Image (tube, rainbow, N blue to C red):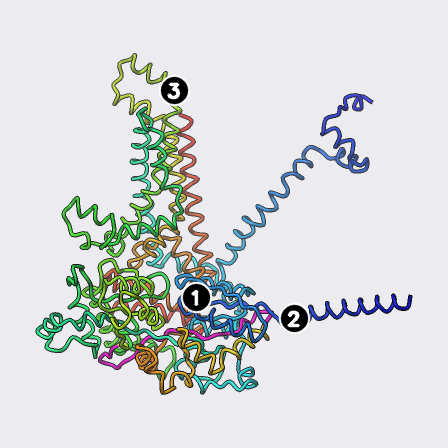
Amino acid sequence: MKKNYFMTAAAGALCAFGFAGAATTQVQAADLTLCWAAWDPANALVELSKDFEAKSGHNMSFEFVPWPNFADRMLNELNSGGRLCDLMIGDSQWIGAGAESGHYIKLNDFFDANNITMDDFIPATVTGYSEWPKNTPNYWALPAFGDVVGWTYRRDWFERPELQAEFMEKHGRKLDVPNSLEELKDIAQFFQGRDIDGTTVYGAAIYTERGSEGITMGVTNSLYNYGFLYENPDKPYDLEGFVNSDGAIAGLAYYKDLYDTGTPPGSSNWYMGENIDAYKSGQVALQMNFAFIWPGVEADPNVGGGKSGYFPNPAGPAGQYAQLGGQGISVVAYSEKQDAALEYIKWFAQPEIQAKWWELGGYSALKAVVEDPGFASSQPYAQTFLDSMAIVKDFWAEPAYAELLLAMQARVHNYVIAGEGTAKEALDGLVEDWTETFEDEGKL
Amino acid sequence: MGDEKQMTDSPIDKVAQATPAPLARRIRGLSDRAIAWIFVAPSIFLLLAINIFPLIWTVHLSFTNFRANRPNRDVEWIGLRNYERILSDSDVWNTMQATAHFLIWTIVLQVLIGFALAYLINKKFKGNDLWTTIIVLPMMLSPAVVGNFWTFLYQPQIGLFNYVIGFLTGADPSSFSMIGDVNLAPWAIVIADTWMWTPFVMLICLAGLRSIPDSIYEAAECDRASKWRQFWTITVPMVLPFLMLAVLFRGIENFKMFDLVVQLTGGGPGAITELTSINLKREAFEKWRTGYSSAYAVILFVTVFGLASIYVKALNKVKER
């Protein structure tokens, strides 16, 4: 009997330990959900995250939403306090709302405790993706994916002797990477309606999309370089004379002229996907797009393998700037697995993981990666990425960014695509809209 | 005893017999009205929870500056300010104009073409059923899908629509852009919607045409009425209630049109095809001006409800004739 009691007790103990062990494992191994846009880099992140799963024991799930619906879907999720996402790679402009509405957790203490310093990242990405208020050491995200608007061009077309000769005769200079926005427009007009290998091709695919953020992400590349400023540098939210300065008006008129004279017919609502399609199918000589597309261009059988070249947004009369893209990774405040989510960020911040991120097609923002001596020559577009990241500017990241963005979308699209009114009227209207928004926000 | 005598072995009687006596007594004590309320109550509760309460809450929010994306911000009662801003906002009136253009032209075209198709299909001919099936196919598609593939049809370089127009007129197909041109875009959405929903109007008209007894036409023939006269004095008046019903359905549907137009033009170029529903969605779920958009929704609701009520009264008068 004693033996039976002993056996029963042992079995009971084993069961108890077994269950306890299972329970402990359940607590430790979390199922994390990471939310991001559905695009090529997201696939690279899935691949990269397998390393995290192997090392941490956590399972990663992913919720990827196509870009046109990304903001709608994810901001609804955040605004409703949803628990779908533990980690959010949100757009840079969301950082203000993320911080002020309590959607993201503040990461300063976590960074300090884990020796993660923002000095290790490209400064523009820290300001753009992590800080709120801007230019203060309050961090709500880790720079995850550096991105910037740049240009891709058909090097194989540019190098054709007959086109070189014709361009030289017409413009008195070599058909080459443009040094200014005006030169870029000349090139776009040069290719517009041209017959190449029996196909009619066009100049440039530029951002014109109306519904989300497309045309704003495009037009700012000319506005900045002609003198547009979001506000008086000495007086926040003072817009008059900065948003609608003479330079800004010229920049907007430039973009309309480029659209009217150097873009494919029917390109009135194009954004990233449409531009990629037009370029890869051989419709255009140039395309404006975020840098994330460059690995895909290089790998494409039609336009990759040396047929394409890359250059940063060319300078204008007021300087050389480019629209910042990219995102930081944040921990969602409504997540019940914040510790595991922080573990992911700690893993992601490691230099070797960031190096692998770049290898897989993700644009690391870690200085150790991009300042590596071999980085610039590691890919045909790597130097252009570095040059572009050095000249970035970003849209408002205010909590009311969506309202500010939609106003700009409407005003710019009305003028550039619909041809209503003048550039001055469009920007004067924008000042009115933005002023009203800031008044509603109590900032004015 | 009399009741017991009438008991049979039917399932209902079995259930009645199996009902515990205290419960049976309670049920027996209820009036017909009370039993009716028991049956209706769940529906009324759901109606109140899903329709009436949100409506009242929307009206309440329309007098505030509430923003759903700022739950921590103080909500102020601002009276009629949202209504004043909407009614004095030229952008809102532009979207109303765009909606009116879309609404009027889609209804006119769909009624004319739908009725003509129904008239033709109503004639007995070989392949009648096959043609009916082919014609109704578009309305079985999702509006988002229709919007998407019409963007391809309208492509200046590869689009079939541009090619056909070019073929018929001799114009260069890539010389015009249906969805990129301010003058053409409003017609682009009218054409796509007409293509999709004309079959719906046709089906309703067909039902109307088939409901006219042959004897009426036979009597008219005896009176030597011409075909033209038969059409205007028999066919049109008898199909009119059906046509008006189709107009009501299409009017309400197109007043809240969203998916097809968003897919096709995104409201552009500029805001030329931004219908009120698209504008309202932007205000409510992109700009997150919840109070403002609630007032906007109330205005639209009152407008549609008012117009529909007047129309239904007219429809009833036509039916009574």
What residue sits right under mark 1 in the picture? Answer: A37
From the image, state whether disc 3 or disc 1 is nearer to you: 1
What residue sits right under mark 2 in the picture? Answer: A27
Which is more toward the observer, A367 or B231?
A367
Q: How many marks?
A: 3
- Local packing at callout 2 (Cα closer than 10 Å; few below 14, some 14-19, many 20+) is few
Q: How far apart in space, not on screen, are marks 2 and 3 (Cα)?
A: 75 Å
Q: Is residue A443 depicted above or below B282 in this figure?
A: below
Q: Where is residue B158 shown, x and y percent of the image?
A: 24, 53
| Protein chain holding label 2 | A
Query: Magenta segment: does it hold A220?
Result: no
What residue sits right under mark 3 in the picture? Answer: B213
Q: Which residues are magenta?
A: A314-337
Is disc 2 placed on a helix, strand or loop? helix
The three-letter code of the residue at mark 3 reads Pro
Q: Who's the residue at 30% across and 73% down the image?
A: A220
